[in-house]
């Protein structure tokens, strides 16, 4: 073995002693600098205190002096270190005296500061403002695990001091602090918690617990943030220690951490850069989700669609916490309530947009469900939220089908999530059936049909979640105003389930919902429920108390939307075909509701109302007495619209009049056949029958006809002039003189009509009223005359106009066999 040269050994000893003396000189010099600096600061404090400087400026300058003095104290070497470098007892005693003088000067500075102006005591308030404590605590916590024992000892002592300062920030102990100007030594405030340096040495769990208990939330967040940044450190030891302390802190105190969204976003970006400890970062996501699921999930949904692998891994990390699975699903459902793509730009009709310019958090949430739902930790929560998930995803299918995106951006996340939900809920067979019918490939083409088909398929398999799904749909239905798209989905879903599961009778609550939907201000909703009721007619027939439903449909006749009126007419007719005849207790009201529609501006509505009126009369032939008044109420439009230019309306009038006149036992039906039809002959026949059986109605019929004389439609004016003439001829003796004068004024206006035929017909009618007026010499005589004729005046009318109807099949009314018979009378 080699032996060291004695001369070399001596040289090393000399060198070590030289370095030691150099270090000692440096430390002694730093103590002397602190001593001289504090003396200088003390002089400045005294000078400012004795000056006439503005108190506010005094306070600001003196506060800076205090901060400078404190800085001098904290950079001083420890007394123990200095002692190690002194060789004699005298040197050590001198160093101790110097230390005491430095601290005494600092104490004098503080006391001098407040001796004159007590308001400056705010400098010493116990609510210490130390905004960097969190960052400092992170650095010290790492040093507590340093390889150098002396560094560990100093760091643990520093951690004790730091936590004491943090306690001062938390507790309001300044109220009891004496302010009488007496000298006090600098000491930490008393506390129930005692911090011992040894408990922080190499014990990361204890550090995390103590720091989490003591630091305010904002400072603890700084602590967590600083450790998070250390995970990217090139020093493996620092990164590993930071990871351990970070995990312990979040396990014990994650609920106190603020800025969760920022932390999650930072983790995402660092994971994308692959410059950090991936497993630890993902575990942080898990721990944050445990206490702040809503904040984490909202941030995870705020990234571009479709999600990349990094984001999916973060979703999986967030989903590993079974305890917060319900909260996570609630948050996702909250996001799914929004409509994707609703930005100012996308409202421009017909314009397509890429995904990155629209609000697509709902699409991200739909995609996220594909990750969360299959997780074993979510099995129980998925079962709990099945109705909400099913319904909300159907909403999203509806929204996505309306979203105008560029072809490359087409997304099917909602339907993918829907399939995952079915397979995670024991409904694999439903998914298989839908797939066999190529349903999923066509889902977005017709969302309304999609909702119907899913509900139908679920019903066919008698899905066990039916009761809670029905309750949830009902809850949604009664909660209040919703988007029309949502209401459409609810209506289709709910009605299909009801139709399949209730074969005998419907719950009474559902009838209330139907009634409200029929009267909805949105015509799309009204029309849809009316359409769905057609499919439900058999089960509605078995349900009691459907009168309110029928009345709601009658109210829909008054809608300003023609398509709603047409659907209401069709739905009512379909229901009446299915309902037991006992329901026809509403027959009179139903018949009266048809009458206003017979004069509707829409030809389709006119023809359907007239046709359905006739069917109602025919169906109620056993209750003719109930409808006689209604038939006579609708008689005027039924007659006048025989001349309608719309052939559908004219044909409907003929068919309905055949039914009505047969029910009234009038011999008019054969005149309504095409080969015999003549408008004037039909009017003449009806008026002759009125004289015989219903003369008391003639005045009301004249009044009804009067309104049509003002019509802008030529065929109506012609027909009404003829009808009112025959009614006057048959029942003119029933009119009062004032009424005759009104009629004369109206007819006189038509004598100047631009249509020659109307002018010619009006002249005949005008003469009729003039003759009636001439016969009425007084009101008294007329009234007596009425009483007399009421019993025996039954003379039939004869043709008056010789009218050739443009829609008629007979060249001249004089060729009609009926005219010859009338003349014979």
Image (cartoon, grey):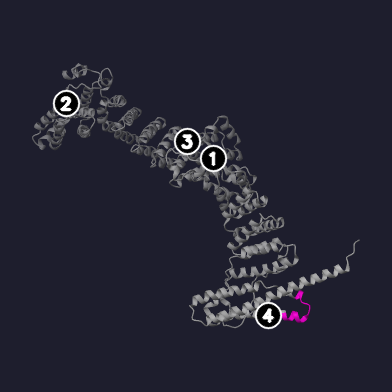
Q: Which image quarter holds the N terminus?
A: bottom right
Tell me the CA gap for discs 3 and 4: 87 Å
For disc 3, the marked residue is 448
For disc 2, the marked residue is 756
- Depicted 75 relative to depicted 497: above or below: below
For disc 1, the marked residue is 414
Tell me the CA gap for discs 1 and 3: 15 Å
Q: Is residue 87 magenta?
A: yes
Precedes in sequence: disc 4 or disc 1: 4
Decide which of 505, 336 is in the foreground and name it.
336
Decide which of 576, 584 is in the foreground and name it.
576
Q: Residues within 10 Å of mark 2 (few under 14, many from 20)?
A: few
Residue 340, image x, y percentages = 49, 43
Query: Does dot 4 land on a helix, a strand or a loop?
Result: helix
Q: Residue furthest right?
A: 1
Tell me the CA gap for discs 4 and 1: 74 Å
Precedes in sequence: disc 2 or disc 3: 3
For disc 4, the marked residue is 100
Query: Does dot 2 land on a helix, a strand or a loop?
Result: helix
- Mark 1 or mark 3, whichever is nearer to me: 1
Q: Are marks 1 and 3 in contact (CB under 8 Å)?
A: no
Precedes in sequence: disc 1 or disc 3: 1
- Mark 3 or mark 4, whichever is nearer to me: 4
- Mark 1 or mark 2, whichever is nearer to me: 1
Tell me the CA gap for discs 2 and 4: 128 Å
Decide which of 92, 517 is in the foreground and name it.
92
Q: Which image quarter holds the C terminus?
A: top left
Magenta highlight range: 83-94
Q: Are marks 1 and 2 in contact (CB under 8 Å)?
A: no
């Amino acid at each position: 073995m080699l032996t060291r040269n004695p001369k070399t050994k001596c040289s090393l000893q000399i060198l070590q002693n030289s370095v030691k003396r150099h270090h000692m000189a440096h430390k002694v010099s730093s103590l002397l600098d602190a001593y001289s600096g504090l003396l200088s600061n003390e002089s400045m404090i005294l000078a400012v205190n004795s000056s006439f400087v503005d108190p506010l400026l005094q306070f600001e300058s003196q506060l800076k002096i205090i901060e400078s003095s404190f800085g001098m104290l904290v950079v001083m070497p420890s007394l123990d270190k200095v002692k190690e470098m002194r060789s004699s007892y005298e040197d050590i005693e001198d160093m101790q005296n110097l230390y005491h003088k430095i601290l005494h000067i600092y104490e004098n500075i503080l006391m001098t500061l407040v001796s004159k102006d007590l308001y400056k005591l705010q400098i010493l308030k116990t609510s210490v403002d130390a905004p960097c404590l969190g960052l400092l605590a992170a650095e010290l916590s790492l040093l507590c695990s340093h390889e150098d024992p002396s560094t560990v000892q100093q760091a643990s002592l520093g951690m004790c001091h730091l936590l004491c300062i943090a306690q001062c920030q938390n507790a309001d102990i300044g109220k009891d602090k004496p302010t009488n100007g007496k000298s006090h030594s600098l000491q930490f405030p008393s506390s129930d918690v005692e911090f011992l340096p040894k408990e922080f040495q190499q014990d990361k769990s204890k550090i995390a617990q103590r720091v989490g208990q003591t630091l305010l939330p904002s400072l603890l967040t700084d602590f967590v943030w600083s450790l998070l940044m250390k995970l990217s450190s090139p020093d493996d030891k620092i990164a590993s220690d930071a990871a351990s302390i970070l995990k312990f802190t979040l396990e014990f105190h994650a609920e106190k951490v603020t800025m969760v969204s920022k932390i999650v976003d930072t983790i995402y970006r660092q994971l994308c850069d692959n410059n950090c400890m991936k497993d630890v970062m993902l575990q942080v996501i898990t721990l944050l989700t445990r206490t702040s699921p809503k904040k984490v999930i909202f941030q995870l949904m705020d990234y571009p669609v479709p999600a990349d692998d990094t984001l999916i891994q973060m979703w999986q990390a967030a989903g590993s916490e079974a305890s917060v699975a319900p909260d996570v699903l609630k948050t996702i459902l909250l996001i799914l309530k929004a409509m994707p793509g609703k930005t100012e730009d996308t409202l421009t009709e017909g314009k397509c947009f890429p995904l990155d310019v629209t609000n697509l958090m709902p699409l991200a949430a739909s995609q996220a469900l594909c990750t969360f739902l299959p997780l074993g930790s979510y099995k129980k929560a998925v079962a709990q939220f099945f109705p909400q998930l099913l319904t909300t995803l159907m909403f999203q299918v509806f929204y996505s089908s309306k979203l105008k995106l560029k072809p490359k951006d087409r997304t099917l996340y909602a339907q993918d999530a829907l399939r995952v939900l079915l397979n995670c809920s024991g409904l694999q067979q439903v998914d298989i059936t839908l797939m066999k019918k190529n349903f999923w490939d066509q889902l977005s083409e017709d969302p309304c049909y999609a909702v119907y088909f899913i509900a139908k398929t679920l019903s066919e398999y008698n899905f066990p979640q039916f009761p809670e799904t029905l309750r949830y749909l009902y809850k949604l239905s009664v909660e209040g105003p919703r988007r029309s798209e949502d209401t459409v989905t609810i209506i289709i879903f709910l009605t299909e389930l009801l139709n399949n599961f209730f074969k005998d009778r419907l719950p009474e609550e559902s009838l209330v919902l139907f009634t409200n939907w029929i009267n909805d201000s949105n015509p799309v909703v009204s029309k849809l429920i009316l359409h769905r009721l057609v499919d439900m007619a058999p089960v509605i027939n078995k349900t009691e108390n459907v009168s309110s439903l029928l009345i709601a449909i009658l109210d829909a006749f008054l809608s300003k939307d023609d398509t709603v009126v047409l659907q209401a007419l069709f739905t009512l007719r379909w229901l009446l075909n299915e309902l037991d005849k006992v329901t026809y207790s509403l027959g009179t009201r139903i018949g009266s509701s048809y009458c206003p529609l017979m004069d509707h501006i829409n030809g389709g509505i006119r023809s359907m109302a007239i046709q359905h009126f006739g069917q109602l009369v025919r169906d109620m032939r056993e209750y003719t007495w109930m409808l006689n008044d209604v038939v006579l109420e609708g008689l005027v439009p039924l007659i006048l619209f025989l001349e309608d230019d719309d052939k559908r309306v004219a044909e409907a009038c003929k068919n309905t009049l055949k039914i009505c006149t047969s029910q009234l036992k009038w011999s008019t039906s054969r005149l309504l056949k095409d080969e015999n039809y003549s408008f004037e002959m039909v009017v003449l026949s009806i008026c002759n029958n009125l004289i015989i059986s219903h003369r008391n109605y003639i005045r009301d019929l004249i009044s009804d006809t009067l309104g049509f004389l003002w019509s802008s439609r030529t065929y109506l004016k012609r027909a009404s002039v003829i009808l009112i003439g025959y009614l006057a001829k048959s029942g003119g003796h029933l009119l009062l003189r004032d009424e005759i004068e009104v009629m004369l004024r109206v007819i006189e206006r038509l004598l100047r009509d631009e249509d020659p035929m109307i002018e010619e017909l009006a002249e005949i009618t005008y003469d009729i009223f003039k003759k009636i007026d001439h016969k009425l010499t007084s009101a008294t005589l007329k009234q007596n005359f009425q009483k007399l004729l009421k019993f025996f005046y039954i003379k039939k009318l004869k043709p008056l106009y010789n009218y050739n109807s443009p829609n008629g099949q007979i060249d001249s009314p004089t060729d009609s066999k009926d005219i010859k018979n009338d003349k014979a009378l």
